[in-house]
Amino acid sequence: MNASAALLPATTTPTVHERRWLSSDHCAAPVLDLLHALNWSVVDTPEANCHATSPDGHVYVGWLPEDPTAWQRNIVWQIRVQPTEGGVAWVQEFGVHTPSEAVAGFLAALIAHSSH
């Protein structure tokens, strides 16, 4: 999961007037653009869901807008992490109203932390 600093989002402090983008538009582009830039394997399904796996195979990201099971739990994003060296696996899920930019930021922080 190595990532160069150039691929990760820049840290900024937006003013109140710049925060309009923090609303859910149900668009996966911020996350998928990041994962494509990092050379993750991304697969689209005929149902319009996307599944991505990190190059080392330890992280899975699912964009699940058409998965009935995910919708029953009110989520559209699922991130599963299997740590190296036999650590305990964990899952983070994000709901339908979570901005994709927030999910991309979460993933960027996860990727940056794991590359140290």
Image (cartoon, helix red, strand yellow):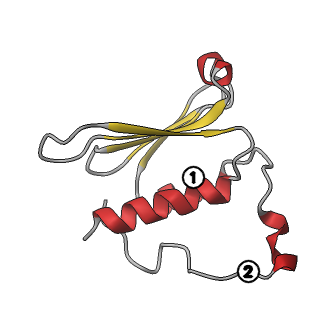
Asked if disc 2 and disc 1 are in contact, CB closer than 8 Å, the reply is no
Residue placed most toward the observer, 25 or 73: 73
Q: Amino acid at mark 1?
A: Leu
Tell me where residue 58 appears, x and y as whole percent: 28, 44
State the residue position of label 1: 32
Q: CA distance from mark 2 to mark 1?
A: 23 Å
N-terminal of the pair, mark 2 or mark 1, is 2
Which image quadrant for residue 12?
bottom right
Q: Nearer the viewer, residue 30 or 45?
A: 30
Within 10 angstroms of label 1, few (less than 14), some, or many (20 or more) residues?
A: many
The residue tagged 2 is 14
Query: Residue at 65% of width from left, 59% of height from top?
Result: 101
**What residue type is disc 2 on?**
Pro
The secondary element bearing badge 1 is classed as: helix
Depth check, front residue: 43 or 11: 11
Percent position of residue 84, x then y: 18, 47
Residue sitting at x 57%, y 58%: 104
Q: Is residue 36 above or below residue 12?
A: above
Q: From what the image shows, is residue 60 above or below residue 114?
A: above
Image position, residue 3 (x, y; %): 36, 69
Q: Depth-wise, is mark 2 or mark 1 nearer the camera?
A: 2
Q: Residues within 10 Å of mark 2 (few under 14, many from 20)?
A: few
Dividing the picture into quadrants, the one containing residue 70 is top right
Res. 38 in view: no
From the viewer's perspective, tell me whether residue 23 is left or right of residue 71. Answer: right
Q: Position of residue 13 (x, y in %)?
A: 67, 82
User: 116 left or right of 10?
Assistant: left
- As drawn, 111 above or below 84: below
Secondary structure category for the residue under label 2: loop
| Quarter of the image where the N terminus is located | bottom left
Q: Quadrant of the C terminus?
A: bottom left
Q: Residue at x 71, y 53 (%)?
A: 99
